[in-house]
Image (cartoon, rainbow, N blue to C red):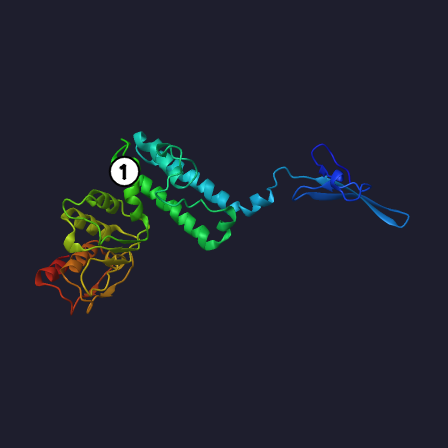
């Protein structure tokens, strides 16, 4: 074996059980290149040299490629948040994203990791080689990014309340949101947060539940705006007992359905308002059946007018 200044292994002859043997420990992914071959007596002699690719990853790095991908993605998300929000909130929002993702310590918690949300990147590198865990980590990271952008928008800048605003909107970043337990009356503390969230037209929302009768007018108007604009929401329940959830994508025409049968679904006036909002922007529907529901005359006329 011919070794150079860089292409070489570690001499561990001093550890050998047999003092007459010369042993060399080779690094992972070392290549051996045959230089020449020959025969000495009855022995085949192969002259070879080492070849080390200095760019080669270690075995740990090879096994941790997915976590490295997630870490780089998280850093990029933090940079995108810094560029995408108001200048006065940019640095704080970016730092919160990095802290929530576990990329760094959070300055406002005395150097401790922010534990408001379990970090998507806290597991050992090998854990992310599982497809479900990797997919969940990507989804959680996107939730953190969306929460930071929404919180900064709500705050219209920093002011020290950005972390609290982000904590408030994080539960709304799931694909399925149940707000039936929220206080969304006129004096409800979550009204402003929920309205801002709805006005942002959440891109990951697929299922939403709330009690129409217990929410204020601002929330109702914001909800109808979601129905008109959403590209993802496929199940909406407004708190009518026995009523089958509505599919806003069919109502607003995102799903090109020319004929829609909503009969015998126990729909009431609350659902009728949702139906009317969706139909107001639907340009493909030609036939609608809402018979055998619990619609009042006024609710039915509201649908007819659009």
| Tag 1 secondary structure | helix
Horizontal and vertical percent for residue 157? 27, 32
Residue lying farthest to the front in this orientation: 17
What quarter of the picture does the N terminus occupy? Answer: top right
Residue lying farthest to the left in this orientation: 297
Q: Is residue 16 left or right of residue 55?
A: right
Quadrant of residue 244 in the image?
bottom left
Q: Is residue 291 above or below residue 192?
A: below
The crowd level at tag 1 (other Cα within 10 Å; few <14, some 14-19, many 20+) is some
Quadrant of residue 88 in the image?
top left
Horizontal and vertical percent for residue 159? 27, 31
Q: Is residue 171 left or right of residue 221?
A: right
How many dots with numbers?
1
Quadrant of residue 259 in the image?
bottom left
Closer to the camera in the image, 39 or 19: 19
Q: Is residue 90 left or right of residue 70?
A: left
Closer to the camera in the image, 13 or 145: 13
- Residue drawn at 56 percent across, 43 percent down: 61
Q: Is residue 301 above or below residue 144?
A: below
Residue named by callout 1: 153
- Residue drawn at 51 percent across, 46 percent down: 125
Horizontal and vertical percent for residue 124? 50, 46
Residue lying farthest to the right in this orientation: 41
């Amino acid at each position: 074996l011919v070794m150079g200044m860089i292409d070489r292994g570690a001499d561990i002859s001093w550890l050998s059980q047999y003092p007459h043997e010369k042993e060399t420990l080779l690094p992972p992914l070392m290549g051996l290149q045959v230089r020449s071959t020959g025969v000495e007596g009855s022995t085949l002699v192969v002259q070879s040299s080492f070849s080390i690719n200095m760019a080669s990853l270690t075995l740990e790095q090879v096994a941790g490629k997915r976590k490295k991908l997630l870490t780089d993605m998280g850093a990029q998300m933090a940079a995108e948040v810094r560029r995408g929000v108001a200048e006065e909130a940019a640095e704080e929002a970016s730092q919160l994203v990095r802290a929530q993702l576990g990329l760094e310590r959070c300055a406002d918690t005395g150097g401790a990791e922010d534990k408001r949300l379990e970090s998507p990147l806290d597991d050992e590198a090998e854990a992310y080689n599982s497809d479900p865990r990797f997919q969940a980590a990507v989804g959680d990271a996107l939730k953190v990014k969306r929460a930071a952008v929404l919180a900064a928008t709500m705050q219209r800048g920093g002011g020290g309340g950005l972390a609290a605003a982000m904590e408030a909107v994080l539960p709304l970043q799931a694909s399925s949101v149940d707000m039936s337990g929220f206080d969304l009356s006129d004096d409800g503390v979550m009204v402003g947060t929920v309205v801002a969230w709805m006005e942002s037209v959440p891109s990951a929302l697929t299922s939403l539940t709330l009690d129409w009768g217990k929410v204020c007018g601002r929330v109702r108007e914001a909800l109808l705006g979601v129905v008109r604009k959403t590209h993802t929401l496929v199940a909406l329940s407004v708190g009518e007992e026995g009523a089958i959830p509505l599919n806003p994508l069919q109502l607003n025409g995102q799903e090109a359905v020319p004929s829609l049968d909503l009969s015998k679904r126990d729909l009431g006036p609350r659902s009728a308002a949702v139906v009317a909002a969706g139909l107001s922007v639907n340009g493909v529907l030609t036939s609608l059946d809402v018979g055998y529901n619990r619609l009042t005359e006024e609710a039915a006329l509201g649908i007819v007018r659009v």
